[in-house]
Image (cartoon, helix red, strand yellow):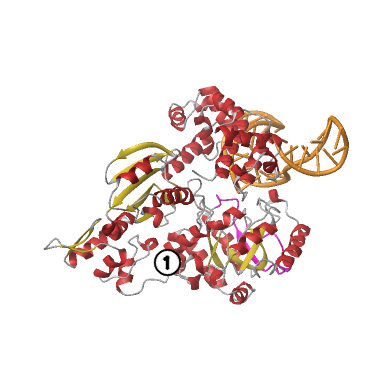
Amino acid sequence: MARPNEEVEALLQEYADLVAITGGDAFKARAYEKAARAIGGFPTDVSKLDVKGLRDIPNVGKSIAEKVVEFLRTGQVSDVEEVRASVPAGVRELLTIPTLGPKKAMTLYEELRVSSVDELLDAIHDKRLRDLKGFGERTEENVLHGIALMQKAGGRILLNSAMDVAEQVVAELSRVKGCEGCAYAGSLRRMRETIGDVDVLVAAERSAAFMEAFSGLPYTAEVIAHGEKKTSIRTTKGLQVDLRVLPPDSWGAGLLYFTGSKAHNIRVREMAIRHGYKLSEYGLFHAKSGKKAVSGTEEDIYAKLGLPWIPPTLREDRGEIAAALKGELPELIEEGDIRGDLHTHTDLTDGVSGLEDMVAAAADRGYAYFAITDHAPNLYMQRMTDQKILAQREKVRALDGKHRRMHVLHGTELNIGPEGDLDWPDDFLAGFDLCVASVHSHFNQSREELTRRLVRACENPYVSIIGHPTTRQIGKRPGIDADFDEVFAACARTGTALEVNSHPERLDLGDEEILRAKRYGVKFAVNTDAHSVVHLPYMRFGVGTAQRGWLTKDEVINTWPLQKLRRFLRPGGR
DNA sequence: GAAGGCACCTTCTCGAATATTATTATTCG
């Protein structure tokens, strides 16, 4: 279902985890992790490659290439199956709890036979962890905290995973004979940051063929419900997908209804009643006669209620109806407005694609400009040096205008230290076209310290963008506890843009913070933070999030022409 | 297990933070 590269990545990562859990060679585990990342970020479909082609991927050698071939041919790998047999899947699940790593997970399994999150909760309640070597009261607290965090995400999945499934289902069903329309709706169409289940709509006179095709999709693991109007399945990855087939003339009403949000629908229905109508998923009807007024398109229905069409990303009952009535809906930013990506990495630090590949891929997306912003020296593990970044600058200059005349900017992603300090002195920073600055560690400082830290970074004249401002990771880690109102005010004062990071695990800032920040008159930059050419298309999720935050293109610096952008990037130029 | 220099052997993020009690082990970025 997912790209074969992603399936292979998941398999190799699983094997790496299992090697670590079973106390195997740490370097071997790391070798599998590196190969997993390289394959996940590799642009060519691995199922089209043989052993030789696979070995051309960096960090993939003979042994891993052969395992990949075995997997693609048979659907499994004997070495992986062997370890799977000795370690229950639930033990690996324990690794997803923050503060629990492979060593502690194995201790829990060997000493207490704990092999699931639920069993771990039981063990903690029975106070059985206390007797284990290396476990104490704080360990219990941290584990409980971590589990609570995971459960809050409550089975919802990330936007990109849901999108992959939805687009494949839509493509499949669009090919079925009699299909007059097919689209995904629900929270996915509204671009919410996590998705509970996927809703797909089909417009057709007869439903049977669609229900058949849907139930028979290769990644359908279980058919939950099978009826004339609605069929629900669960995919092999556990995601529920609902299909509804509507008569073609109910398309607009159905799309409106199933897109939601519930709160938005209630508002629209109330308006319908006030106008003497009744609105359902089948259409807008005259209340008295019961005759249908309109139902064909969303525009028709909104228009009858005196409203312009409202973009799905705004349908959250956050004032969109009042704004629409006043003719004050924002002219939302769209993906086509983006002229360049201002936060990306290469294999000089932790990316997996080379500089030239990144630049070529960006040019293929039609960008007018593109910034390379590899990590700076204070993120020690990336081993950046002055010499390396200056050598990269030479290469960047040579690539400027070489691909479809796209301008290439040389930047860096600085690390905001515990005191708000940055990696390089100002005279060195002056050599970059732009600097992104981000927090990467020390998340647990006090609110005052965190706030001061971010404000100090904003105040550096060479810092143009604060990267992933809250540093949250969806379902894994909450954002840092800074006083963001103070940070937003500092950004407005100093002319520092806030990033809307498009990576589906981040989406940072999120929609609600964008709405708050906007009120301070801050500018934004919608960036991908791509670590591979395959991440560049994540831009759509950042733009979707920006739309949910009611952003217009004027507020987003990377929709601007290069000259205007350069003025903004110049110290004191904002 | 991969990759580089060499034909088999060596190196492969590094440092901080945290929880633990062992002047240590584990996790994280």
**Residue lying at 44% horizontally and 60% vertically, measured from the top left:** A511
Taking the view exactly as shown, the residue that stands out farthest to the left is A288
Q: Main secondary structure of the magenta part?
A: loop
> What are the residue bounds of the magenta stretch?
A419-445
Q: Quadrant of residue A52?
A: top right
Give the residue at x 38% y 55%.
A183
**Is residue A28 visible to the viewer in this orientation of the structure?**
yes
**In the image, what residue occupies the spot 47% across and 40% down?**
A145
Disc 1 designates what residue? A550
A152 relative position to A491: left or right: left
Q: Is residue A416 left or right of residue B14?
A: left
Q: Where, by quadrant of the figure, is residue A260 drawn? A: bottom left
Query: Residue, x 37% and y 40% (percent of image)?
Result: A215
Q: Quadrant of the C terminus of chain A?
A: bottom right
Tag 1: amino acid: Trp
Q: Chain of mark 1?
A: A
From the viewer's side, name the closer residue of A86 and A292: A292
Give residue A200's position: percent from left, percent from top.
Answer: 36, 50
